[in-house]
Amino acid sequence: MKRLLVLVVMSMLLGGCVLPTEKGNVKEADPDNRNHFDKVTLRPGDSAICMEEPCAVYFVMPSGDGELTIKGNNVYPEAFPAGQTVFLGSYWGGSYTFHAEGTETPVSYLTVIRSGGGDGDFSSGR
């Protein structure tokens, strides 16, 4: 009986990790369904700080036709449709820049504060 109870509880806890949504042809967990995320929406030229990690980052793409590639410091380059708000990913402690390649839009900056293990010490690195 105890094993069954543990199995049911574990299934419920892990169930939140597999909430599928569509992003192109790839299924991934929707960060908006996980309430432990800090979340920011950046526009070209914006600066933001996330006080919790991981940080779900959305970006308002510059207007235009087709796709634009977002590049930056500590960012994997990826193409997204112009003129839409897109999910760039979840970011952990550190500093990041984002720029739409091939445009004259300003760079956006993001700082994600590292969790200090609950003791208030934000200087401990991972």
Image: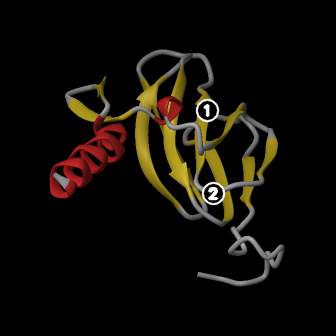
Q: Nearer the viewer, residue 102 or 75?
A: 75
- Please report the residue visible at 73 percent of the width from the left and 45 percent of the height from the top: 108
Judge depth for marks 1 and 2 and give the one in front: 2
What residue sits right under mark 2 in the picture? 53
Residue at the spot x=52%, y=30% of the render?
32
Q: Earlier in the sequence, mark 1 or mark 2?
A: 2
**Which residue sits at x=54%, y=18%?**
84
Q: Check disc 1 and report its element: helix, strand or loop.
A: strand
Q: Which residue is mark 1?
A: 59
Amino acid at the residue labelled 1: Phe
In the image shown, does 3 or 10 lie closer to the viewer?
Answer: 3
**In the rendered image of this protein, does residue 126 appear above or below residue 14?**
below
- Residue 13 screen position, x and y as percent: 35, 45
Q: Could you tell me residue 93's position as x and y percent?
A: 65, 66
Looking at the rendering, in which quadrant would you find the C terminus? bottom right
Of 89 and 99, nearer the camera is: 89
Q: Left or right? Give the position of 20 relative to 120.
A: left
Q: CA distance from mark 1 to mark 2?
A: 18 Å
Left or right: 94 as drawn, with respect to 47: left
Amino acid type indicated by mark 2: Glu
Q: Secondary structure at mark 2?
A: loop
Give x and y (percent) for residue 21.
31, 25
- Crowding near pointer 1: few (<14 within 10 Å), some, many (20+)? many
Q: Is residue 66 left or right of residue 53?
A: left
Q: Residue at the spot x=72%, y=74% of the render?
A: 116
Task: Judge the density around disc 2: few (<14), some (14-19), many (≥20) Cα neighbours within 10 Å.
Answer: some
Residue 67 percent location from the top left of the image? 42, 26
